[in-house]
Amino acid sequence: MTRTRDFLPLLLNLPAVILLVAFIAYPIGISFWMSLHRYNLRRPDQVYFHGLENYATILASPEFWNALWISLYFTFMAVLLVIVIAMAIALLLHESFRGRGVVRALLLIPWAIPGVVNGLMWVGLLGDYGAFNAMLEDTVATVNYLFGINIVYTGMASPFVALNAAIGAHVWRSVPFACIIFLAAIQAIPTEQYRAARVDGATSWNRFRFITLPWLYHAVLVVAIFETMNGFRAFDLIYALTGGGPGDATHVIAWQTYKEAFARLDFGGANAYSYLITLITMTLAIIYIRLLYRRGLVQG
Amino acid sequence: MARVRLKNLTKHFGDVVAVDDVTLDIADREFLTLLGPSGCGKTTLLNMIAGLESPTVGEVWFDDRNVTAVAPERRDIAMVFQTYALYPHMSVFDNVAFGLKMRGVPAEDRKRLVLEASKTMEIEHLLDRKPRALSGGQRQRVALARAIVRDPGVFLLDEPLSNLDAQLRVVMRTELKRLHGELDMTFVYVTHDQAESLILSDRIVVMKDGQIQQIGTPETIYDSPANTFVAGFVGSPPINLLKGTLEQSAGGAWRVVGKGFGCDVAASIVEQMETPEGREVYLGVRAEDIGVGEVLAEGSTSGKSNVDLTDIRATVVVREPMGSDLYLTVDVGGSNVKVRTRPDVRFDRGDSVELSFDPKKIHLFERESGESLVPDR
């Protein structure tokens, strides 16, 4: 009887455990194991264990460092813009105005759009015949005319425009999620805090600085962690919008991983790339959490 | 220091009238309490004095200055909130200093003033702590220090003791009374606790449904309630209200007669009425104004000697010893009546007793309107 009772919970958990092992634990394990192998499908006869060789090769390659810097720039700009824009929108949506509910619902739309669709949509806007492209072109022409200068506008053929357009599209899609987190955090600030601050003589800027912002540290951190990870893993959008180009201008680290796996068919190298991305994002997450502990916002 | 005058203050929230035409004159350095149940408009009224709510109609004056449209930060007020509203990310020192910092007081002066206020509130040893590391009582002291540090003219307190446990509430009540004695400030205090209001106030404003029911000293409010609401709200246990009718006996004396009781009424009360005969009233009598005695014989009792008229038979329903007092709930003609008596009285559940109401202490209220029929004592 007792044995049956002990066995039953295990049995009931077994399907979930099998699924977790099959779809999460096993791929993670096999991926790491593959990263320690020379594993190129072009040479399927030459699969063998060679330790940390893949990692060493990656760390010595200029491609990796280029991709890392592009990813860092992409992520830094994306996190910064998402936090600033989402906070501004959340503060606006916290105010009461007619149609606030509708606006809050509409805000979610970009979040619901898959990354590839988002990329294709921005291709439409920023492509040769896109509205944004035309606007940018006209703006550059006007600036040239007004200041008598000659900036050559090449649209998405320009590495600078392509990378920043990708950041813009990524931010556009990421803002709603961050906005919801900020809005929830703002709504949790007790009204009496603001009332007390008003009686204490705080201006609206000081109320934002000394009340709203400190209350939002936690939410900012959560958004920063999420967005950092999203930034480092950005791939589908890049795939649809720029295809990694022009040249290697939008070769973010996830793109580089894709290239290793599906262009060069080097699965050993690609898995090593994946683990490096994991290592970087985990390091950043630990730094963020440490910062939070230091601020005393999380009970130790 | 400031005299606060409210002129016909009204506040609507959509269709709801939170405060309805309130006119009030609060003297300089007075301790005035706004007392009433939840939703009576007392906090809204306080917020309008603070400038945190704008009145729909009416004006707020501080001394000779109309401050109706003046922002809270320019009103020379300080406020203590029910939840203390301490800034959780700042130390106690920074919390207390915040108002001074916002007003551009130099750092040196800030430090001196914070230390002074901390000394008054006995929180000098807590200055480096964050609010979450403080007990409820300590938080309350910090909130008070934050309020007094700026030496405001008007000190507004919104149910500041309601989050404290019973023992601490007693301590902080004394502290507030001491503070009012030491500081040259006008205190406006909001509470739903009638005991707090009686202990602390120079005057009490009893509110219901956004309207003032009565303004008076604690003694006036307690001894001469303006209506059944005030009589029932102020005092613990609440006043006993018994339905009755005014009748004149053959000898010319007036009595209130109801189900299971009859009680003499002073001629001075009845003389003021136009048509006293047959008038339907509530007889109000407080628990401590009722004598209770053993049933000896028809029409006579033992018990309180100062009560000489009674023919009220009752049965004890509940006996509640409270240490210094004993509360008995007795049944009078189907109505429950609370009686406060000495703890050594031995009556218990089911005992028959005779009650005596002190005619000098009874209250009469118009049945329909609930208004008092007894002139102020």
Image (tube, rainbow, N blue to C red):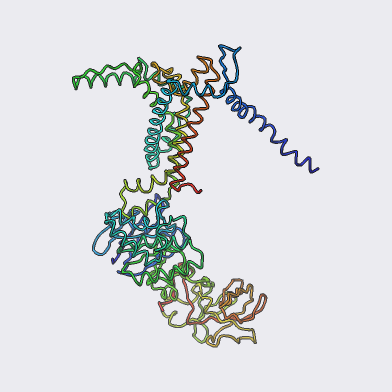
Q: Is residue B287 above or below residue B69?
A: below
Q: Measuring 60% from the left and 18% from the top, which residue is drawn there?
A: A48
Nearest the eye: A220 or B377: A220
Q: Measuring 48% from the left and 60% from the top, which residue is drawn there?
A: B135
Numbered label tally: 0
Q: Horizontal and vertical percent for residue B11?
A: 36, 55
Q: Horizontal and vertical percent for residue A182?
A: 43, 40
Q: Horizontal and vertical percent for residue B166?
A: 51, 66
Nearest the eye: A286 or B140: A286
A287 left or right of B336 in image: left
Instruction: State the image quarter where residue B257 is shown.
Output: bottom right
B66 left or right of B218 in image: left
Q: Is residue B42 visible?
A: no
Instruction: Specify the quadrant that holds the N terminus of chain B.
Output: bottom left
Q: Is residue B351 visible?
A: yes
Q: Horizontal and vertical percent for residue B284?
A: 50, 74
Nearest the eye: A288 or B92: A288
Q: Is residue A97 above or below residue A163?
A: below
Instruction: State the image quarter where residue B375 is shown.
Output: bottom left
